């Protein structure tokens, strides 16, 4: 039997992206819309899905959807699968919306410590990057609003941790006292960023170091455009300071953010391999039997 | 010569408080108004001052004003005095608005590290608490939006650090993803608070531990009322985890917040002495010749 087309969908909090893949996993066509799960009118997920993808859903086509669409606030809940887990475990726990036609991919949970951790969508990107990199073991980093650091052993995620780095950057730069002396629209300043990364390694912690942005501004030692990149460096540096780094780290995400993590990881002596959106499509293809 | 009355004023960001003191430092009368420096109409500081205190400013009366009124955004700038500094150094750098009648008290700066730190208003509370406690040496903590930890030696502040603990609590509980599963109006839950304090000692850092509030909520292991106290414990615990604590710590502030710090410091084995608003009046009296 010839493997059918796969419609791969990444349905997150703020965006809806889809790709039509051929049997070999090649991308035939891509689409995206600002229809994240928080922007679905009247909770009509089926209607939004049909409007975006019905022309792709020919007889025999199958659609796999990763991301927040499978959360309690999404189309339907696909409960978290516990670590350790790989593509096989995810494939066994798909939540079918229409049998053999449309399924939601579950997220992962890590309940090994006192406090659980969760991811939803990143696990598919990790499995995709594993295939693209030809790796069955490694440390995978997914920077973002809630950055994920996942350890992979023999093709399965054995554990991971979340860091609220991107969200805290947004909170500080928009809503805190630092916003008064920080130009969040300024272009990236690599020197200021590196200063922030270095500062984060002083062991004083974020609550103290963040106030330094204010104090440096008061004494005219950090300009508003520099402050934005310095704060970004402080936060990413703080995140990195919690990690035991192997020689090589895989970073998956949008290029601007990946570049910053590569700079900070380089300061710590790690080599970086990077992947972008293609990891999602390859990861969803990996869930196909 | 008989020492004249002192009008002691604490003019902060959000509130204006004043006390009329007798020659011995006793409080004859107190007043307060929600007229912090951000709420002064048209920047008319002289007008607001007169409306609040002109009846107290009899001939011979003297007024000392501490807090943000002496900042660049205040009535006039009283530049920071560098550490180490005690009451004598502050008294020598008063910024007189009217000669021998109304003066702004400068704040302190600590420029001993790579990044400077600043306080404005807390230094007066520290000098007051020193007098009240009969201490010339010690570690003084002033919890708040921006908590201060100050080291005092031989009656002078030799160095200090700021932690954005209160502001970050506000950011997380109002503007972050944690706000969705956190009841910020809930009464204090001591058990949840202690769990948060303990968690902060795990070495994983705030960016990771804060996400745990979300994950514990998702798995119904932390209710919205508990989440507020747990987050408070996480943040205060994070602040404390950066300190080398002596056997005794002096904590100065409002009673509800001081109680939380006393609990957290107790977990770390420190004895706590506490002072409230009276420290400000005693500290301003200490600046009188």
Image: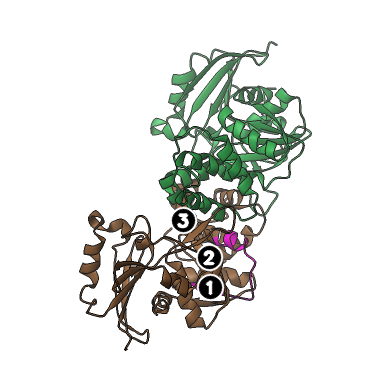
Chain colours: A brown, B green
The answer to whether mark 2 and mark 1 are in CB contact below 8 A is yes
Q: Tell me the subunit letter for badge 2.
A: A
- Mark 3–mark 1 Cα distance, whole angstroms, equals 28 Å
Residues behind callouts 3 and 2 on a single chain: yes
Circle 3 crowding by C-alpha within 10 Å: few under 14, some 14–19, many from 20: some
Residue occupying the point 67% across, 47% down: B241
Q: Which residue is mark 3?
A: A167
- Mark 2–mark 1 Cα distance, whole angstroms, equals 8 Å
Q: Secondary structure at mark 1?
A: strand
Region in magenta: A236-253
Q: Which residue is mark 1?
A: A156
Tag of residue A53 = none
Q: Which residue is mark 2?
A: A83
Q: Is residue A238 magenta?
A: yes
The answer to whether mark 3 and mark 1 are in CB contact below 8 A is no
Circle 2 crowding by C-alpha within 10 Å: few under 14, some 14–19, many from 20: some
Query: Taking B46 as reference, is A257 above or below it?
Result: below
């Amino acid at each position: 039997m010839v493997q059918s087309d796969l419609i791969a969908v990444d349905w997150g909090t703020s965006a809806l992206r889809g790709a039509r893949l051929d049997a070999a996993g090649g991308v035939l066509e891509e689409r995206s819309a600002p229809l994240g799960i928080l922007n679905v009118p009247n909770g009509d997920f089926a209607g939004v899905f049909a409007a975006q993808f019905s022309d792709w859903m020919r007889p025999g086509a199958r659609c796999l959807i990763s991301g927040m669409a499978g959360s309690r606030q999404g189309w339907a809940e696909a409960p978290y699968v516990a670590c350790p887990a790989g593509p096989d475990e995810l494939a066994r726990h798909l939540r079918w919306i229409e049998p053999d036609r449309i399924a939601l991919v579950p997220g992962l949970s890590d309940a090994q410590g006192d406090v659980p951790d969760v991811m939803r969508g990143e696990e598919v990107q990790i499995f995709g990057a594993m295939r693209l990199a030809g790796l069955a073991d490694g440390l995978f980093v997914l920077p973002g609003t809630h950055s994920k650091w996942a350890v992979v052993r023999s093709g399965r995620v054995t554990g991971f941790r979340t860091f609220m780095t991107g969200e805290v950057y947004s909170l500080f730069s928009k809503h805190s006292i630092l916003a008064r002396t920080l130009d969040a629209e300024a272009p990236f300043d690599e020197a200021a960023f590196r200063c922030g990364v270095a500062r984060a390694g002083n062991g004083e912690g974020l609550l103290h170091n963040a106030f330094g942005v204010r104090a440096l501004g008061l004494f005219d030692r950090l300009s508003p455009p520099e402050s934005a990149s310095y704060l970004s460096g402080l936060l990413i540096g703080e995140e990195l300071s919690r990690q035991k780094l192997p020689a090589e780290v895989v970073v998956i995400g949008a290029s601007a953010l990946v570049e910053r993590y590569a700079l900070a990881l380089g300061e710590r002596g790690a080599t970086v391999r990077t992947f972008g959106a293609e990891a999602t499509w390859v990861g969803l293809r990996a869930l196909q039997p």
